[in-house]
Amino acid sequence: MSMTTPTAQLPPYSHELDWPEGLEPYRIIDETGTQGEPYAHYAWMRKNAPVLRVRHTDGDVWMVARHEDVRWALRKPKIFRSQVNDVQELAFLTLMDAPDHSRLRKVVAAAFTPKTIGLVEQRVREVAGAKLDEMIASGGGEVLEGYARPLTMATISSILDVPIDDLEHVSFLSEQMFIFFARLARSAPGTPEDERYTREFFEYLHGNLLRLYEAKSESVGGSIARSWLDDGLISEKEAIELCGFVFVSGFETTMRLMGGGFRELTYNPALLGRLRDNPADAERFVEELVRMRGPVHRAVRRTSEDVEVRGVTIPAGSIVRLLIASANRDENVWPRADEFDIDRDAEGHFGFGHGIHSCLGAPLARLETRVTAELLGQKVASVSFDPDRDLVFLKGNSMTTGPESLRVDLVPAGGK
């Protein structure tokens, strides 16, 4: 792996390679949902095409599949840049490079203190217990919308001190904002409706920041407000958009991570007994879950110069997808990497990022998922899929993966 001047011929495209029978060439956009969890593709790529070129309408996109190479790239932020577009629209940390990234990250990191996380835990336990009890009383239910979504929303409400009555509408606005800016990132025009909802979202966050400042709130939102109004460390625009970043980054991925926990318990029923007998093992459960079923499958970068990976030269200005989910199942790092092993040392996974872009919200995601695992061990005897429903995976070009919906049957502990 090195910086270089390109001399070698570019490798064949994904669709030009001889993929195994039953495995379609890997695609950039999965419109059918057939590559919703492309772990078989990743395994083949790690062995046969660790740097894969895929043709796309906007130009070539490069995939990097092995753990060693993904780690190397994540540690080279000057070469693999996070700002993939010429125009930086949002103060979202995942889309920024130094020096602005470093300056804004310090503001948010200072707000995510152990005290803040501790204040949130009681709220997480209350909501998680109540929602799980509702599902158990009904014999099961929809995990993502019935359990994980309201739990993550309640957590975000505590972190940003958003009134719970506002949260459903603000969540909708944030989703519309994300859609709008995703279109801009693809150089596709947004719609007037998207634009209107985005303005409404930022107007709400602005008003909420002023409210938190006046109330001297100790929440993350209050800390961001003081960094803007008292310390002058960030601008008004940056304060608003940082709150937006905390809102959206703490929602979708954590919701799907918890859904993955329910799924894993259907595949490995003995894990429930392990969690029941040894509640402290919930932490190990979470780390192995993030390694094996982390919902974020890739980190997108743009190369600032020609760079060589595994003997393949990736030209300057190229879009590169660092396949986090593939790296997390690399057999050269974890033997039997496709097996869930609660006793393995999962250290070194990239489920919460790596280097300067490690996830600031990781303690919250770990907290919500750990509490969920603990409560399932206490309250549930078995978790099984609803036999009348097939898993349908997310389609398109989403950064996160997993089922669109996840219905399970639950049997209470003690058979009551």
Image (cartoon, rainbow, N blue to C red):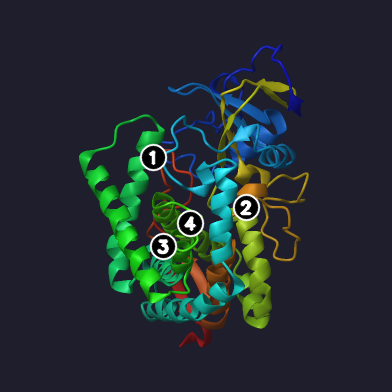
Q: Which marked residue is nearer to the observer: mark 3 or mark 1?
A: 1
**Residues at marks 3 and 4 touching, judged by CB atoms closer than 8 Å:** no
Using the image, tell me which numbered label, if any, was put on residue 182.
Answer: 1
Q: CA distance from mark 1 to mark 4?
A: 30 Å
Most foreground residue, 375 or 219: 219
Locate the C terminus by quadrant.
bottom left
N-terminal label among 3 and 1: 3
Q: CA distance from mark 3 to mark 4?
A: 39 Å
Three-letter amino acid code of the residue under disc 1: Ala
Residue at 75% x, 40% y: name it. Answer: 68
Q: Position of residue 3 (x, y in %)?
A: 73, 24
Does residue 196 appear left or right of residue 358 in this picture?
left
Q: Position of residue 363 (x, y in %)?
A: 59, 66
Three-letter amino acid code of the residue under disc 2: Ser
Residue 69 in view here: yes
Per the image, the residue denoted by label 3 is 144
Badge 1: residue crowd in 10 Å (few <14, some 14–19, many ≥20): some
Per the image, the residue denoted by label 4 is 232
Q: Position of residue 249 (x, y in %)?
A: 47, 55
